[in-house]
């Protein structure tokens, strides 16, 4: 009886396995020969299955985006779409509801909302807090945190080399947490560099810093939401705080639930930590490895301060400094913001691509046109656009001058190709706050910290893109951009 049972079990397993294999073979055959996107140029294996993406992203660790860039050089549509950084998700079924496809676990936050209508409603409730005018009113607070992080770097940096990205993230974390939650985490005020929010969020290592992340998500964030609700109920908050404004808005009750507002707060908290700190790290490395660039921007900022007041100019004034702007925009370009592909699904119309293309090694231009049916995801990455040599010649080099025109003014036509904060209705909500932080902190670093700082065992591999898991990462062996105060 036992042998018959085992024999029957083996047969069942064999039959089920055969059916499973047959199903996926049939699906692969359909994708290659009958799928609505079958005529799109590209590797047949990528058209048939997700095996290439699994191999490059999972087994090779976030390397699929690099693989896509190599496809751009070989396939006509891929090469054409490099101007928009797009690549097709070929085996995605039509979608009517999920207009935006994002792999984010914080499902109730505005950032990860898929429906256009729901996203618009949620974003409208937050927009006023991140408008240029509102951020300008926040500038004194940003400046205060910037002064304090400069002081901390000058003090702690004398004793041992430090990771500059971690140091900069103390500043960005305190700014965004204080603004969104009412109270900052106080990372700048703590004695050392740990614990910090960036370590578990970015490195994904399980360490004592996980307590910071866990407490912010599970403990502190719901507590801040409850406190905001109490303040609203008691009449102590008429909507002056981010949470208070959401709770007193005309959003439906489901949008004011503890779970949703916890996700919203954590999303704002996380997004406000990494982009600016990594951009500043990339800028720091390139300025210190090219002293001529550092001298130029130092001269410009120093002259803007002036001998009489000795005070750093306002954010509005700093934005008018062309070389400082060039340094910041080039730092954003080479730090990418979000490096992974962010998918969009056009649901109202087919997309038509037309253009001319010459195969690699050929000077003969060929006309082409492809129609992308509505309902299929198109993924894009800043990595593709930021290294388009037709827009940014010598794209892997740090060249602030590319952002300055012949009249010594900012070249606004290049802005459309800078995707560090995305574009359109899905662009980064905190872009104005990010620019304020970049201009104010970098200027203070240039006049207060950089004259006393030097890099420590840091090379270009510590800032160059190697792979990505949503955020860009250097080689796995990198110890970060490190420096020391001398």
Image (cartoon, rainbow, N blue to C red):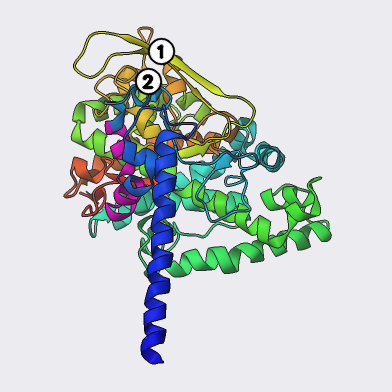
Label 2: how many residues lie within 10 Å, few (<14), some (14-19) or many (20+)? many
**Residue 68 falls inside the magenta stretch:** yes
Q: Is residue 136 above or below residue 109?
A: above
> As rendered, which of 93 and 135 lies closer to the eye?
93
Marks 1 and 2, Cα distance to the nearest angstrom? 7 Å
Q: Is residue 333 magenta?
A: no
Q: Answer yes or no: is residue 206 visible.
A: yes
- Residue drawn at x 39%, y 91% is 2
| 284 w.r.t. 194: above or below | above
**Residue 341 occupies quadrant:** top left
Res. 409 in view: no
Residue span colored magenta: 53-70
Q: Are marks 1 and 2 in contact (CB under 8 Å)?
A: yes
Place of residue 48 in the rendered image (x, y in percent of width and height, measured from the top left): 38, 42
Label 2: which secondary element: helix
Q: Image check: 449 left or right of 141?
A: left
Q: Quadrant of the N terminus?
A: bottom left
Q: Which residue is mark 2?
A: 80
The disc, 1 or 2, on the residue closer to the chain's N-terminal end is 2
The mark total stands at: 2
Comparing 226 with 156, the one in front is 226
Where is residue 458 drawn, in percent x and y? 19, 46
Q: Name the disc covering residue 228, or none.
A: none
Q: Residues within 10 Å of mark 1 (few under 14, many from 20)?
A: some
Q: Which residue is mark 1?
A: 355
């Amino acid at each position: 009886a036992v042998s018959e049972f085992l024999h029957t079990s083996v047969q069942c397993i064999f039959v089920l396995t055969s059916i499973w294999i047959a199903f996926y073979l049939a699906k692969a055959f359909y994708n290659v020969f009958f799928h609505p996107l079958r005529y799109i140029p590209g590797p047949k294996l990528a058209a048939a299955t997700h095996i290439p993406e699994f191999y490059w992203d999972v087994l090779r660790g976030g390397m699929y985006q690099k693989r896509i860039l190599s496809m751009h050089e070989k396939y006509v549509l891929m090469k054409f779409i490099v101007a928009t950084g797009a690549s097709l998700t070929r085996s995605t079924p039509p979608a009517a509801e999920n207009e935006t496809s994002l792999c984010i676990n914080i499902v109730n936050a505005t950032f990860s909302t898929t429906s256009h209508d729901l996203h618009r409603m949620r974003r409208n409730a937050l927009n006023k807090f991140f408008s240029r005018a509102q951020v300008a009113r926040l500038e004194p607070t940003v400046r205060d945190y910037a002064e304090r992080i400069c002081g901390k770097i000058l003090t702690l940096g004398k004793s041992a080399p430090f990771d500059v990205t971690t140091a900069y993230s103390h500043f960005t974390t305190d700014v965004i947490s204080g603004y969104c939650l009412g109270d900052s985490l106080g990372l700048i005020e703590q004695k050392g560099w740990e614990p910090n929010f960036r370590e578990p969020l970015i490195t994904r290592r399980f360490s004592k810093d996980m307590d910071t992340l866990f407490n912010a998500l599970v403990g502190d964030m719901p507590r801040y939401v409850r406190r905001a609700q109490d303040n609203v109920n008691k009449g102590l908050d008429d909507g002056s705080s981010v949470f208070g404004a959401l709770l007193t808005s005309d959003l439906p009750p489901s949008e004011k639930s503890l779970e949703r507002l916890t996700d919203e707060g954590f999303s704002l908290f996380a997004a406000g930590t990494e982009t600016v700190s990594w951009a500043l790290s990339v800028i720091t490395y390139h300025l210190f490895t090219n002293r001529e660039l550092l001298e130029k921007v130092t001269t410009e900022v120093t002259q803007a301060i002036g001998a009489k007041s000795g005070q750093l100019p306002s954010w509005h004034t700093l934005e008018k400094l062309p070389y400082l702007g060039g340094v910041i925009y080039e730092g954003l370009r080479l730090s990418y913001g979000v490096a992974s592909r962010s998918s969009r699904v056009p649901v109202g119309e087919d997309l038509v691509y037309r253009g001319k293309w010459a195969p690699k090694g050929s000077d003969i231009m060929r006309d082409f046109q492809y129609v992308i049916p509505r309902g299929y995801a198109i993924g894009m990455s800043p990595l593709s656009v930021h290294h388009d040599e037709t827009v940014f010649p010598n794209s892997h080099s740090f060249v602030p001058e590319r952002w300055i025109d012949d009249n010594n003014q900012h070249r606004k036509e290049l802005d459309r190709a800078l995707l560090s904060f995305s574009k359109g209705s899905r662009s980064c909500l905190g872009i104005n706050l990010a620019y304020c932080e970049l201009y104010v902190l970098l200027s203070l670093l240039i006049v207060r910290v950089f004259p006393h700082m030097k890099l420590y065992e840091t090379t270009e591999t510590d800032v160059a893109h190697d792979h990505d898991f949503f955020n860009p990462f250097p080689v796995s062996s990198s110890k970060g951009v490190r420096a020391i105060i001398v």
